Image: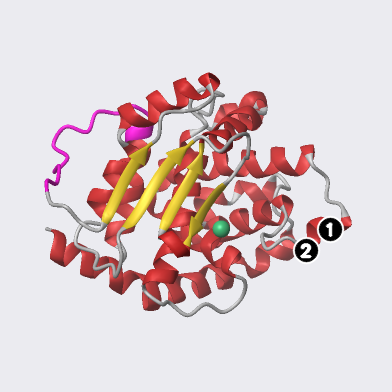
Amino acid sequence: MPESFSRLGSWVFLAALGVSLTGYPASARQNGVRIVYDPPKNSAHEAIHRTLHEKRILERIRDELDGLRLPRVLTIKTTGCDGEVDAAYEASDTTITICYEYLAYIQELGRDIPPAGVREGLTPANYIAGPFLEVVLHELAHAIFDLKKIPILGREEDAADQVAAYTLLRLGKGEARRVIASVAVMYASEAREAPPELKSFANEHSLPAQRFYNLLCISYGADRQTFGDLVEKGYLPAERAALCEEEYRQVKYAFERLVAPHLKEAKKAGR
Ligand SMILES: [Zn+2]
């Protein structure tokens, strides 16, 4: 069982919501993961920078990966990107970069949480935690694919989405529901705001609307009880829903075979 990833998600999310983490076993051990919070170049990003710093979200991810044997130091960096809205893993310098611009963009997308979102306990203020966690897990998936030479069938961007979604779904029913809802709100807002042009189909990522349906499908496939209303309310078409349990099983099998053993290795060596 990929306990490392599931506990990681849970702690990070609770931390992001400001829940006390007394008793969290702070690790003094240094591993191959380096955290950098660059000071923002744009003063509009100062609040985001401060929040990330205070909540120590990335430090907790580093602690959770403690002991993971990496061939090179992995840097996870939040930084100003001169207006570019981006988050990426760069293999040449083994660095995950999350731009403050990307986080500001996520926050902007959440400004109109729909009524359905309110029922999930989502507000514009707390909604950013889910998408932030999702993007970090997505980029971490790229890094682990690369550094651990994990074979990938299908498009790597879809595989990274699947690893992130699978991890988020292990948060436990209530939390998983809220986090998945917040990420779904982000994709839905993106899909609404930027309808695809022809060249959008050439992008290495699936379209926001596809990522929305993929996320709903894997969630419904994982837990029909918790996510059953997605079909009842028509968010996930019944034709796709019929395939979701099998889609989830396929992701689970690949994750457990290819990714989880490395995380167990981290857990064994780290604590
Ligand atoms: Zn990616």
Residue receiving disc 1: 199
Q: Nearer the viewer, residue 12 or 184?
A: 12
Kind of element beneath mark 1: helix
Magenta span includes 138: no
> Going by the image, does 194 lie left or right of 187?
right
Residue numbers of the magenta segment = 15-28
Look at 70% across and 37% down and name the residue there: 189
Q: Which mark is residue 202?
A: 2
Residue 56 percent coordinates (x, y): 30, 35
Residue at left 40%, top 44%? 77
Q: Quadrant of the C terminus?
A: bottom left
Q: Is residue 169 visible?
A: no
Check whether the beta carbons of the residues at disc 1 and disc 2 lie within 8 A of each other.
yes
Q: Amino acid at mark 2?
A: Ala
Task: In the rendered view, tell whether residue 226 sits above or below residue 125.
Answer: below
What element does badge 2 sit on?
Answer: helix
Within the magenta stretch, is there residue 19? yes
Beta carbon at label 1 within 8 Å of ligand 1: no
Query: Going 88% across and 58% down the picture, which residue do you hit?
Result: 198
Label 1 Cα neighbours within 10 Å, binned few <14 / some 14-19 / many ≥20: few
